[in-house]
Image (cartoon, rainbow, N blue to C red):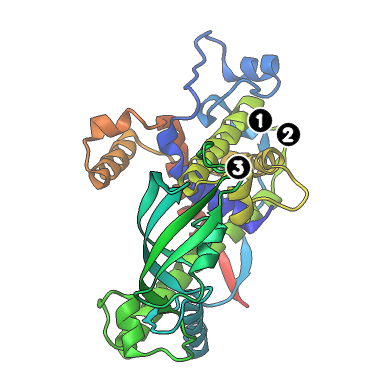
Amino acid sequence: MKKSTFLLTVIALMAMILTGCGNETSNESGENDEDKAAESGLYSDAVYLKDIVTSDIVTLGDYKNIEITLADVEITEEDIDVEMDNLLISYPMPVDSEAPAAEGDEVNIDYVGRKDGVEFEGGSGNGTLKIGSGSYIADLEQGLIGMTKGEVKEVPVTFPDNYDNTELAGQPAVFTVTMNTIQSFPVITEMTDEYVAWLTTDEYTNVADFREQYRTDMIAQAESNYVMERQGLIAEAVVDGCEFKELPQAYLQRLVDNRTTGYTQYAQMYGVDLETFMMISQLLPEGQTAEEAIADQAGNDAKIYLAYQAIADAENINVEESEIDEGIAQMAEQAGTTAEEYAVNIDKEFYKESLMIDKVTAFLEESTVINKQ
């Protein structure tokens, strides 16, 4: 099991609670759990942990004597230097330029488009673009190269064959362009007060203060990553020490659906498809489809949840209704709504399982021995 799997279980799956994936199931037939296990093949129809006797599926290892190896959190001056250099490269500061416009410059233009001497709908306006970015049709962007501030120029273009406006697709036209401003992005090799003020919109006005705040933020992020890695290593050790029978299929499918729904929602937020989102998020191993990767991740999720529930049962670790209600109330307050309204969108059983994960994690951390790397 990869360490990142546990982190995604806690973070990504918690973020998916509001999707309300899955429907609660109950054993209304009056059969006891042993009969149910025998008839369904180890709870193949169980959707939630509450419907599973985990000891029927999981044989726990020695979870009370876990040892892991982990490096201490350390942020050096060299680490901060690297981050400062990355900022200078990633966010170049524009400066007003009197030189002719060149590829890579950001320009502001007024433009009027005409076809056969007649202005066409949607062909006139004002816009800011980086030359070469592809935000305007290629002929127009190329026609801006060499123009100077204040210059007016007629730029002949041919619209692409696949242009959205079918009446203009593949057709010639002429744009009358007025160059309003030109900004270039000279290479800056050293952080300056001016750059810091521009980058932070005057929240910080000198390098020393900005660098100190960046140090604080880097330490906080490193400490958060440390906790996540520690918990991931513990989860890895727990699962590796367990023996599992066949995973309950309905429960496994719910976790597949949760991940699929959550990833899809994030992909839509970023305007990409599911596979692209998973690839850029490093969630898609080479050679796997999105469906195959999600199935593997959900399988690891299921092992963690089943193993941790088995520990909760063995150690009498319970999640009370009051804790669930309190958690929902806190999330509702953060969302600016009432607990009643917020609870409508909550998969309560899944939320209970997530709270169980938190409690068992805290329990395991108390006994885990951490060796310094």
Residue count near mark 1 (Cα–Cα under 10 Å), binned few <14, some 14–19, many ≥20: some
x, y percent for residue 372: 59, 77
Under mark 2, the amino acid is Lys
Under mark 1, the amino acid is Asp
Q: Residue at x 36, y 30 (%)?
A: 345
Q: Residue at x 62, y 48 (%)?
A: 276
Which sits in the foreground, 284 or 86?
Answer: 86
The residue singled out by tag 3 in the image is: 162
**Furthest residue in direction front, as rendered:** 117
Q: CA distance from mark 1 to mark 2?
A: 8 Å
On residue 245, the disc is: 2
Q: Sequence order check: which comes first, mark 2 or mark 3?
A: 3
Whether residue 212 is visible here, answered yes or no, is no
Q: Residue at x 71, y 40 (%)?
A: 292
x, y percent for residue 227: 49, 64
- Secondary element at tag 3: loop
x, y percent for residue 281: 58, 55
Q: Residue at x 52, y 15 (%)?
A: 27
Q: CA distance from mark 2 to mark 3?
A: 55 Å
The image shows residue 222, relative to residue 162, as above or below, that is below
Under mark 3, the amino acid is Asn
The residue singled out by tag 1 in the image is: 56
The count of marks equals 3
